[in-house]
Image (tube, rainbow, N blue to C red):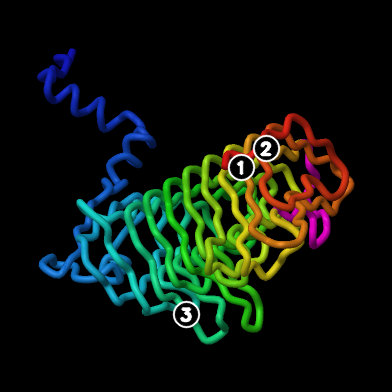
Amino acid sequence: MRPALRMSGIALAGALALASPPDPALAQARTVAKPVTHLVGPTRLLKRPSDAARVVRDGDIVEIDPGTYRDCAVWRASNLTLRGHEGIAHIADKTCQGKALWVIDGDNTTVERIRFTGAAVPDKNGAGIRVTGGSLTVRDSAFEDNENGILTGRAPGKAVTIERSHFERNGKCDPDCAHGIYIGAIERLIVRGSTFRDQRVGHHIKSRARDTSVLDSTIDDGKDGTASYLIDLPNGGNALIARNKLRKGRLAQNTGTAIAYGSEGTLHPATALRIEDNEFRSDLPTVTDFVGNRTTYRAHLSGNSLCGKVNPLSGPGEVRNSRPCKD
């Protein structure tokens, strides 16, 4: 009889490992690169945001030193965080693809502490940020003197969130209108804690989203602004407009309506259309509708303060608990 083969513990473990099928999850984890933080600035290896845009991969972070960058960028990776590093980075004047200072082709992009100014293109529809199909979050940023502040296209299921950001002197109508923000047919827009002032001819906020929320923000024509609507929801949808300070100025291009709903046809059904606890002031010498509802859905106005020559609601709905002006 031949003697049994004996193996050391180390050799036996190795043999068992070779015999076992590979773990797919472990193999995938070994091949996924960890997110990288890229530093951008005059003294860095990457001098301009566009330099970073050429090397980033999904999930990376880009931190941009304070200063002015006359540079445009096209961001194609997804799940990016793009932010000012210990201050505000200023992106100015130069556009990419005839679209925007920053063109965002990826999904789930976050932008923080960036100032965008001077976006203008030959078709006169330039933007500080142009989103071509993904979700976007913007925080603590500024958009000034652009044709559009932010412009998005049609992207079902996607969302745009804007928090603590500032929009001033954006907009034009030559030949078509550009706006403070122009949000295409997406799932959801949320504007929170932000300021819109002195927009030019176009609307401060135009949203074709299925659900739009504008909360705790200031939307003010000021003494020089020539905007049309303060808020335009041309295709209907659910809306919550609450706790904002709103003002129509004497130079407003549209003197009849502050908040327009369904002005271009009802593409989105509405289960809730609520305008609550806002302060609205009109400086116009003629009567302005606070809400102009052009649909068959009922608008619910509650707790709003209306100052000046204002009609609370035109179209179907109810008005309750209006508050006196705070003069």
Q: Which residue is mark 1?
A: 279
Q: Quadrant of the C terminus?
A: top right
> Which numbered disc, 3 or 1, marks the residue that appears first in the sequence?
3
> Which numbered disc, 2 or 3, marks the residue that appears first in the sequence?
3
Residue 73 percent location from the top left of the image: 36, 71
Which quadrant of the view contains residue 54? bottom left
Q: Amino acid at mark 2?
A: Asn
Q: Residue at x 69, y 57 (%)?
A: 232
Q: Nearer the viewer, residue 203 or 187?
A: 203
Which residue sits furthest front? 327
Q: Which residue is mark 3?
A: 120
Magenta span includes 266: yes
Q: Which residue is mark 2?
A: 304
Q: Is residue 109 left or right of residue 67?
A: right
SS type, badge 2? loop
Does the CB distance between marks 3 and 1 fall below 8 Å?
A: no
Is any part of residue 225 visible from this angle?
A: yes
Alpha-carbon span between mark 2 and mark 3: 37 Å
Please provide the residue range marked out in magenta: 259-271
Magenta span includes 196: no
Residue 13 percent location from the top left of the image: 19, 23
Q: Amino acid at mark 1?
A: Glu
SS type, badge 1? strand
Residue 12 percent location from the top left of the image: 18, 22
Does the CB distance between marks 1 and 2 fall below 8 Å?
A: yes
Alpha-carbon span between mark 3 and mark 1: 33 Å
